[in-house]
Amino acid sequence: MTIFCYDNTFEGLLTCVFDAYLYKTFPDALVAEGEPMPMFHDKVFTIVTDGVKSDRVWKAIGKKLSGEAQEELVTCWMADSYPKIDELMFRYIRKVVDSAVSIEINFGDLDVLELSRVFKQVRYERIRLMQFARFQKTADGIYFAPFEPVHNILPIAVEHFKDRFADQKWLIYDVGRDYGFYYDLHSVERVCFGEEDFKSEHEVATGNVNKSLRQQLMSTGSLDDSMLAEDEKLLQQMWKSYFKAISIKERSNPRKHRQDMPVRYWKYLTEKH
């Protein structure tokens, strides 16, 4: 078994493709740095991410795929909950390079079909974030929305919120992956509750931002009352009353409700508290 060990970045994956063709050695498995190696293997190649190599592979792919198909490929990289998504993408890219014609709609190929399915999952998860994000106004005027998506979709969804809420300071946080994006009315930056500079410059509320807050969010899905703005509790109560008022008991369909609004999101929804 031949293994390529790399830094688990998209550019690193493209570098793996370049080196595989350069050395005419194709891996049986890809392993991210720091991950345990398979029990039985013959050779391990350490791949160093190279921007020049990755750009050459990306340009070569662009000659075989449409712009939409390339965008889908980048989107699929965000499917970090999919087991060995990098190996699936490696096989797909290799088939793209080796084929004389475009394979992007060749759904008779199992890898093409599977990658199409993964893309739809990631895209749908992005839509769910836009649908189910519930902002809570904190004591220092920042609108905070915790979330726990299946896939790593914050980077491909943040532009929507930047355009939609350009006049508000906000923070959308992926609780499971422990990072988020903060918008200060000018630009968007990636932040983490554990970073000291974020604690000092961009506190979520009057209290200190630390790991205990993340644990609280994972448990309850909402901020403590002491961290909220004075009018936030009233606004939340008004939203709950509105949600209750528009519900029609005679047309209640719990099964359909769970399909459209999966239970795993409920703890982050104001109307479900």
Image: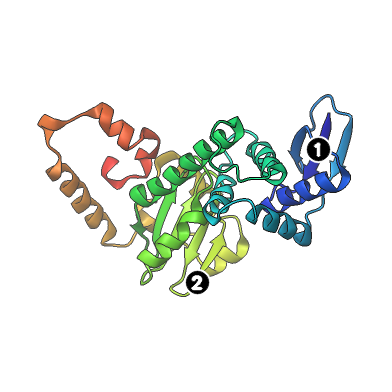
| Numbered mark located on residue 226 in the image | none
Query: Residue 158: image x %, image y %?
Result: 46, 59
Locate residue 15 relative to residue 73 in the image: left or right: right
Identify the residue at image location x=37%, y=52%.
130
Residue ID for mark 1: 26
Quarter of the picture containing the C terminus is: top left
Of tags 2 and 1, the one toward the viewer is 1
Instruction: Give the mark count.
Output: 2
Q: Is residue 35 visible?
A: no
Query: Residue 62: image x %, image y %?
Result: 63, 56
Which of the two discs, 2 and 1, labels the residue nearer the N terminus? Answer: 1
Please name the amino acid that badge 1 sits on.
Answer: Phe
Relative height, residue 70 to residue 104 (above, below): below
Which element is circle 2 on? loop
Locate residue 26 relative to residue 116 in the image: left or right: right
> Quick one: which residue is furthest to the front in this view?
100
| Numbered mark located on residue 187 in the image | 2
Q: Residues within 10 Å of mark 1 (few under 14, many from 20)?
A: some
> Quick one: which residue is furthest to the top in this view?
40
Name the colouring of the figure. rainbow
Quadrant of the rendered image containing residue 257? top left
Query: Residue 252: image x %, image y %?
Result: 17, 31
Locate residue 244 relative to residue 141 in the image: left or right: left
Which element is circle 1 on? loop
Identify the residue at image location x=72%, y=60%.
55
Relative height, residue 119 to residue 210 (above, below): above
Quarter of the picture containing the N terminus is: top right
Q: CA distance from mark 2 to mark 1?
A: 42 Å
Query: Residue 246: image x %, image y %?
Result: 13, 44
Please name the amino acid that badge 2 sits on.
Answer: Ser
> Closer to the camera, 220 or 269?
269
